[in-house]
Amino acid sequence: MPLIQTLFYFAGFISFILAAILMIVTLVMILGSYKRLGKFADTVEEKMNQSIVSILMPFLPAIIALFGELKRSHKKN
């Protein structure tokens, strides 16, 4: 399997995992409006704000686009 294709599979897998984690965290925050889950949701929100995932999330589309450009330029050569 070529290196570029392997990188694409890896990037797709990582983005899928990050999206799943983000959906779960968002669901917990929405449910956190109820009293019994409020403290748990606040804790999760604080941890997410401090984590590297929240820092890298805005750059994820740019990273995927960069891989796309690499693949396109690799096909031309």
Image (cartoon, grey):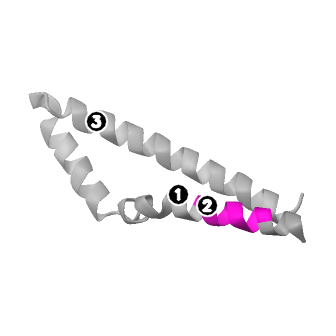
Spatial CA distance of label 1 from label 2 is: 6 Å
Spatial CA distance of label 3 from label 2 is: 30 Å
Of residues 8 and 20, the one drawn nearer to the viewer in this rendering: 8
Q: Does residue 65 belong to the magenta stretch? A: yes
Q: Quadrant of the N terminus?
A: bottom right
Between discs 3 and 2, the one toward the N terminus? 3
The residue pinned by badge 1 equals 61
Q: Position of residue 4 (x, y in %)?
A: 79, 63
Disc 3 + disc 1, Cβ < 8 Å: no
Between discs 3 and 1, the one toward the N terminus? 3
Question: Please, is residue 14 above or below residue 7 in the view?
Answer: above
- Amino acid marked by disc 2: Ala
Asked if residue 15 lies left or right of residue 76, the reply is left
The residue pinned by badge 2 equals 65
The residue pinned by badge 3 equals 28
Q: Position of residue 22 (x, y in %)?
A: 40, 44
Asked if residue 43 lies left or right of residue 16, the reply is left
Question: Please, is residue 22 above or below residue 27 in the view?
Answer: below
Q: Which residues are magenta?
A: 64-72
Disc 1 + disc 2, Cβ < 8 Å: yes
- Amino acid marked by disc 1: Pro
Asked if residue 12 lies left or right of residue 36, the reply is right
Of residues 30 and 44, the one drawn nearer to the viewer in this rendering: 30
